[in-house]
Amino acid sequence: MDNKKTKIIHAAIDVFCEQGIEKAKVSDIVKKAGIAQGTFYIYFSSKLSIMPSIAQVMVEKMLVEIKKNVKETDSFVEQLRTVIDVVFTIAKDYREIFAMIYAGLASTEFLQEWETIYSPYYSWMSKFLGDAKTAGIIRETIDPDQTAVLLIGLIETVAEQTFLYSHGDKNMADIKKKEVLEFAMHGLGIK
Amino acid sequence: MDNKKTKIIHAAIDVFCEQGIEKAKVSDIVKKAGIAQGTFYIYFSSKLSIMPSIAQVMVEKMLVEIKKNVKETDSFVEQLRTVIDVVFTIAKDYREIFAMIYAGLASTEFLQEWETIYSPYYSWMSKFLGDAKTAGIIRETIDPDQTAVLLIGLIETVAEQTFLYSHGDKNMADIKKKEVLEFAMHGLGIK
Amino acid sequence: MDNKKTKIIHAAIDVFCEQGIEKAKVSDIVKKAGIAQGTFYIYFSSKLSIMPSIAQVMVEKMLVEIKKNVKETDSFVEQLRTVIDVVFTIAKDYREIFAMIYAGLASTEFLQEWETIYSPYYSWMSKFLGDAKTAGIIRETIDPDQTAVLLIGLIETVAEQTFLYSHGDKNMADIKKKEVLEFAMHGLGIK
Amino acid sequence: MDNKKTKIIHAAIDVFCEQGIEKAKVSDIVKKAGIAQGTFYIYFSSKLSIMPSIAQVMVEKMLVEIKKNVKETDSFVEQLRTVIDVVFTIAKDYREIFAMIYAGLASTEFLQEWETIYSPYYSWMSKFLGDAKTAGIIRETIDPDQTAVLLIGLIETVAEQTFLYSHGDKNMADIKKKEVLEFAMHGLGIK
DNA sequence: AATGAATGAGGATTCATTCAT
DNA sequence: GATGAATGAATCCTCATTCAT
């Protein structure tokens, strides 16, 4: 892989987290990446064009963590609980990035790429739900593809709000996670 | 009266919808509002400080529409369907604004105000769920306050994604609404 | 006298001292004067047109102090010492204003008025020197009018520099005053 | 090299002389310097931060002229007369700049730099007086360091006032120069 | 005379992007 | 590929001044 490109992406993630997307400057990113200003434009055509790469890194990070923590030998509910845990953990660390990705980047330029990037995430969840449906664990009326998007949206939304608005209330995250799990279990019609 | 202030807010909503938040210029807003550039700064300290006022208008709009359309004589499920309809309709018209509000404004400056603004919305939903719980329509383990936030988040998320990503697919909105309603019904444990 | 006009002038002196001339805003002045923004323009045609009035107040203040403190029964040298004292005292309190007046206001618009305002100050000094010359206390080659300007300039310059540059050195003012007095005495050719 | 920086400084001096400090625009300066607007901010952090550099150029110019014109073989009085001539000449050409420097920049931000910049000028004068004192040409009670500041202040003040207030009166400069020289000679106690 | 909301020209400053080395 | 000085368009915001009340 291109070492410099990776450096830029990670520097950008840091800077966006620290300063917010609007206030982040290309000059901050390159400073953090330890490269020259011009070098940025060898790898990315503009300041915004780095966004899909960031989203990709985040999605990969999410999938890696999910795959690492979700044990197939666990029960479905336990696995779902683990997924929720992972999403909350990442949402906590990358609040700003998350919000940004969530808002669809406030620009429709990269929508196509967006979906491509998200698809492995949705696919994993879709298969997860599909398997559970086949195994008769969740209700038969579940459409795995549709529900994957909906469920991820639900978990991410609550996770994001938890860390944006809760005033350092440590227990809040646990309460929210419990609520989401319970609602999701009923929503999926777990038997 | 705050006639000028109201003009500015509505002009800002229009401009943000048309051009996106990033590209919107203060000069466009004041032109649309029919006032001088300097007048803007009598009422708002900066371009971003309008955001809470906009959010307030959106929340009010949402509540007005919900109260207008939700008929108490309807069944709970029918009322829920109506709420989903309203959210989808407004999300469609004010996609950009919605995304922005949703992203928590990409700045932590106004978070406090945010919650104040959203609280009537959450209160309504909480009472809606509380009444249903009292009437034995939804499961007893529901915490109306927690679930209000969660349910609003679920509906808004799916609504937003629907109009951001669906490629002009007219049916998609109906499919999504149906999915959300079904998932929510199960999640709430409607009997 | 017009009460409002006086209020404006004194408010302006305060604001200029606190914020410097460049950063002083008309809005600060009127706030301090306790009047409306528009009222300022009833008494002064522009922000800068208040300058001559300020200079006048300063000159009057200077003359009042000099006349109050200089005792005709004192020796010439003692009287000169008192003048120096007064100038240093006022320079200390009104450093910014002094610098401003001194710089000729950085605008040639009010030069004519300037001279009119300063003339009683110069006149007093000229008479002071003329009397001393007649009494044979200072050298005969002194031209009282020319030397008045020169002497005032000398004292003011050193006073101003003393308070601009001396880093809170309490003794510096005394040393400078002594030096000025000595130089002036020799310059005037005191016998 | 600092070719660009030098260009900016000299362009700024020109523009300040032509338009006055307040009315000078950065855009005028860069236009005259033949560079882009943004380039200005690579070398100077703001419009005012160029002032110390200008003062430095002026002080250097003054010293160069003094050293060029003051001949060591001349008598002390002749040398002093030459210094006065030089100061008057430069004050005439750079009236605005002079007034600005003199007013201590109307802002205390750069006072520290100010003294650093002026020190070679004061040093030269101090040595000039010290040598004269050693040679027994001026009175023994002279403190060269103190008197250097005082003498420069005297000459500059009168020079400045001469060109600010004299209404194109050609002879005035000569009269003033003569007066200053005579007063200074007595003040220094020339034997 | 007094008010103070409204004005809008005006200019400083920023920062994404380029390009000669 | 890498550099980073140079660019200059873009736009926010200020604040002296006006004028209807």
Image (cartoon, coloured by chain):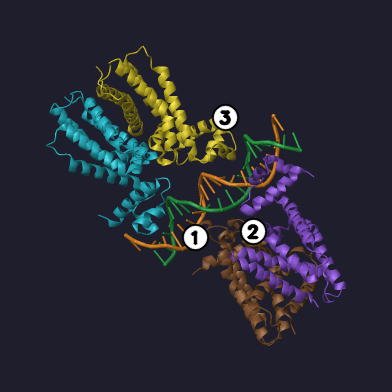
Chain colours: A purple, B brown, C cyan, D yellow, E orange, F green
Query: Spatial distance from mark 2 to mark 1, Cα to Cα?
Result: 21 Å
Q: Assess whether mark 3 and mark 1 are in contact (beta carbons under 8 angstroms).
A: no
Left or right: A128 in relation to D18: right
Q: Amino acid at mark 2?
A: Ile
Residue at the top extreme of this rendering: D73
Left or right: C51 in relation to A133: left
Residue C86 is labelled as none
Task: Indicate the quadrant where residue D169 lies.
Answer: top left
Query: Spatial distance from mark 2 to mark 3, Cα to Cα?
Result: 41 Å
Along the polypeptide, which appears first: circle 2 or circle 1?
2
x and y percentages locating residue B136 in the rendered image: 69, 87
x and y percentages locating residue B8 in the rendered image: 56, 64
- Report the chain holding disc 2: B
Q: Are marks 2 and 3 on the same chain?
A: no
Residue at the right extreme of this rendering: A134
Q: Secondary structure at mark 1?
A: helix
Q: Amino acid at mark 1?
A: Ile
x and y percentages locating residue B50 in the rendered image: 57, 62
Is the residue marked by circle 3 packed among few (<14), some (14-19), or many (20+) residues within 10 Å? few
x and y percentages locating residue D48 in the rendered image: 48, 40
| Residue in the picture at 60% in, 71% down | B118
- Report the chain holding disc 3: D
Residue occupied by mark 3: D2
Residue B21 is labelled as 2
Q: Are marks 1 and 3 on the same chain?
A: no
In this rendering, the answer to whether C16 lies above or below C122 is below
Is the residue marked by circle 1 packed among few (<14), some (14-19), or many (20+) residues within 10 Å? few
Residue occupied by mark 1: B42
